Image (tube, grey):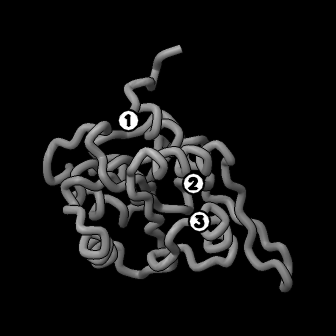
Amino acid sequence: MGVEDLDFADIELLAFDIDGTLTDATTWWGGQERGWLQRYSVRDGESLLRLRAAGVVVVPLSRNKTDAARQRMKGLKMETRWVGVSDKLAAVDEIAAEYGIAPQKMCYVGDGAEDGHVFERVGLGCAVADAHPDALERADVVLDAAGGQRAIEEIELRRAGRWGTR
């Protein structure tokens, strides 16, 4: 569980994994010219932009080293220093120092077994619905959305107190 109880409305920084969180963890080989390809939800991208416009610092934190991931983040004008990292825990500390935001004020969304350790470092750890069992066990919140199925949009709506309303 997270370092402290952090409500979605109190999130100052949202960090997120890419593979299995923004994507459904599926990749396609596009050939030598294109490399590995992934599918992203446009609505998650829009949610990331709205969260940033609302004053939330939004940072991808992923081991993904593909050009597809880097280009998607650049297209959203996201910081890419922590795309392709090997040590996510060290990256959390770097991000905290860079933005002057304590890990206790951060939310991290992920799906992998290694993401459970990140959940324990931040104030609010969120696993997507189809995350690895180790991530599900360590998460503060298990989202209703699976990876690639608008998990970031769910975070945005939960933050606004609008999740589950019609």
Which residue type does callout 1 highlight?
Arg
Most extreme residue toward the left is 4
| Residue depicted at 32% across the width and 40% down the height | 141
Mark 3, residues whose alpha carbon is within 10 Å: few (<14), some, or many (≥20)? few
Mark 1, secondary structure of its residue = helix
Which residue type does callout 3 highlight?
Lys
Mark 1, residues whose alpha carbon is within 10 Å: few (<14), some, or many (≥20)? some
The quarter holding residue 162 reads top left
Horizontal side of 90 relative to 145 (left or right) equals: left
Q: Cα distance, mark 2 to mark 1?
A: 18 Å
* N-terminal label among 1 and 3: 3
Q: Which residue is mark 3?
A: 77
Which residue type does callout 2 highlight?
Leu
Q: Is residue 58 visible?
A: yes
Disc nearest the viewer among 2 and 1: 1
* N-terminal label among 2 and 1: 2
* N-terminal label among 2 and 3: 2
Horizontal side of 114 relative to 63 (left or right) equals: left
| Residue depicted at 47% across the width and 70% down the height | 62
Residue 57 point in image, percent of width and height: 39, 58
Mark 2, residues whose alpha carbon is within 10 Å: few (<14), some, or many (≥20)? many
Mark drawn on residue 22: 2
Residue 139 point in image, percent of width and height: 30, 47
Residue 127, compared with residue 99, is above or below; it is: above
Q: Which residue is mark 1?
A: 159
Horizontal side of 141 relative to 5 (left or right) equals: right
Tell me whether the residue at label 1 lies in contact with that at label 3, contact meaning CB atoms closer than 8 angstroms.
Answer: no
